[in-house]
Amino acid sequence: MASKTKIAVFASGNGSNFQAIADAVAAGSLHAEVVLVVTDRPQAFVVERAQKAGIASFAFIPSAYDSKQLYEEMLKEKLQQLNVEWIVLAGYMRLIGPVLLDAFENRIINIHPSVLPAFPGKDAIGQTLAAGAETAGVTVHFVDAGMDTGKIIAQQTFAVGGRGREAVEKEIHDIEHRLYPATLQRLFSQ
């Protein structure tokens, strides 16, 4: 049996996509090992989720470093010590810089709550609704130096149908929690 792909999940908040990934690993539908959860917000709920799942977490405060390069060098070293093969962003609210992009070239994945290239960046759901878009959805993509500009790997859409923000958010989260683990499994199986 092939060894499991070692991943680090980066998150800044609640961690529901991390939870979906951890649940898929536990269920055997995602042949991977989450070796570390990284957060830039030490009080983020994802830390508690990781603890409950028995997965190590590492929290850092970006402003404690003189530059993005310095904290990314620290993260790169930590990830390499753990033999991390892929970085999986799950609500990580920072752009990835050259240090990690070079060290994990074509091995950093993100999930975004819109049908990219439409509505990149923060509050994509709000942007979608404000624009009166007829469809909303989720995109899984490779990470590059831009904001939500990397090559698209998978997308799933649905009709907004006049629904309010709460209903649209729920549908997006439901899709994310299925699409992300399934897409990661396809990537790791190639």
Image: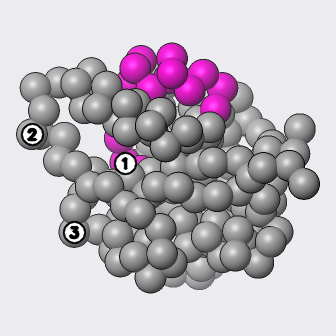
The type of residue carrying mark 3 is Gln
Q: Are marks 2 and 3 in contact (CB under 8 Å)?
A: no
Camera-nearest label, 1 or 3: 3
Q: Earlier in the sequence, mark 2 or mark 1?
A: 2
Q: Is residue 186 left or right of residue 113?
A: right
Instruction: Report if residue 129 is visible in the image.
Output: no
Q: Is residue 37 left or right of residue 85?
A: left
Give the image location of residue 105, x and y in percent: 60, 22
Q: Residue at x 17, y 47 (%)?
A: 61
Is the residue marked by circle 1 packed among few (<14), some (14-19), or many (20+) residues within 10 Å? some
Q: Which mark is residue 64?
A: 2
Q: Residue at x 10, y 26 (%)?
A: 66
Q: Residue at x 63, y 48 (%)?
A: 6
Q: Is residue 173 left or right of residue 58?
A: right
Residue span colored magenta: 92-107
Is the residue marked by circle 2 packed among few (<14), some (14-19), or many (20+) residues within 10 Å? few
Q: Earlier in the sequence, mark 2 or mark 3?
A: 3
Give the image location of residue 127, x and y in percent: 48, 53
Q: Earlier in the sequence, mark 1 or mark 3?
A: 3
Q: Which mark is residue 93?
A: 1
Label 3, on which residue?
Answer: 43
Give the image location of residue 160, x and y in percent: 69, 69
- Cα–Cα span, label 2 and label 3: 16 Å
Q: Is residue 62 magenta?
A: no
